[in-house]
Image: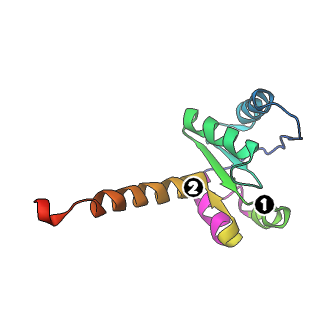
């Protein structure tokens, strides 16, 4: 089972450049990663912290990005953080958070499914 050994905030404020935010989040990633991955918890999908975390997750295979997270949800999940792998944590927080909470992984799965549906729907039997 994976264990999360550390956690820390990355403060984002209006006017902070994307480059500076990216550096801060990259530093936090390397500081927090004990070799078992990192989970970025963000409040708003599509906001700069979410976008930067998403880009970092493409470079670091053991990164999870969760959006829609609230302080009460974080408090609820704290008891689970040392007993779950990052993928188990991702599934549990999305389940507990309801429709407002999602993960980059879940969003990518939706895109893959909708893309395959589009491909299937574009096949016209009259041309076969």
Name the residue rendered at 85%, 41% in the picture: 12
Q: Position of residue 26 (x, y in %)?
A: 72, 31
Q: On screen, 63 above or below 67?
A: above
Quick check: can you spot residue 85?
Answer: no
Color style of the picture: rainbow
Q: Pointer 2: what residue?
A: 87
* 45 with respect to 112 (left or right): right
Checking the image for residue 78, the label placed there is 1
Quick check: can you spot residue 52?
Answer: yes
Q: Which residues are magenta?
A: 80-95
Closest to the observer, 51 or 36: 51
Q: On screen, 97 above or below 9?
A: below
Mark 2 and mark 1 in contact? Answer it, CB < 8 Å.
Answer: no
Residue 5 part of the magenta-drawn span: no
Q: Position of residue 106 (x, y in %)?
A: 54, 58
| Magenta stretch: helix, strand or loop mostly | helix
Which of disc 1 and disc 2 is earlier in sequence? Answer: 1
Q: On screen, 39 above or below 71?
A: above
Q: CA distance from mark 2 to mark 1?
A: 15 Å
Res 97 → quadrant:
bottom right
Res 92 → quadrant:
bottom right
Neighbours of disc 1 within 10 Å: few (<14), some (14-19), many (20+): few
Instruction: Locate the C terminus by quadrant.
Output: bottom left
Helix, strand or loop at label 1? It is: helix
Q: Position of residue 72 (x, y in %)?
A: 84, 67
Res 89 → quadrant:
bottom right
* 26 with respect to 64 (left or right): right
Name the residue rendered at 79%, 67% in the picture: 76
> Which residue ends up furthest to the left in the rendered image?
128
Q: Position of residue 59 (x, y in %)?
A: 57, 32
Helix, strand or loop at label 2? It is: helix
Name the residue rendered at 71%, 62% in the picture: 80
């Amino acid at each position: 089972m994976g264990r999360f050994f550390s956690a820390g905030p990355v403060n984002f404020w209006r006017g902070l450049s994307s480059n500076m935010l990216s550096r801060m989040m990259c530093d936090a990633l390397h500081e927090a990663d004990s070799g078992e991955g990192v989970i970025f918890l963000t409040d708003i999908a599509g906001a700069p912290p979410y976008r930067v975390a998403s880009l970092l997750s493409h470079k670091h295979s053991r990164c999870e990005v969760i959006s829609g997270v609230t302080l009460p949800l974080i408090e609820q999940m704290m008891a689970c953080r040392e007993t779950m792998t990052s993928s188990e944590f991702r599934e549990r927080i999305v389940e507990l958070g309801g429709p407002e909470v999602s993960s980059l992984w879940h969003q990518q799965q939706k895109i893959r499914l909708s893309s395959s549906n589009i491909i299937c729907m574009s096949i016209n039997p009259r041309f076969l």
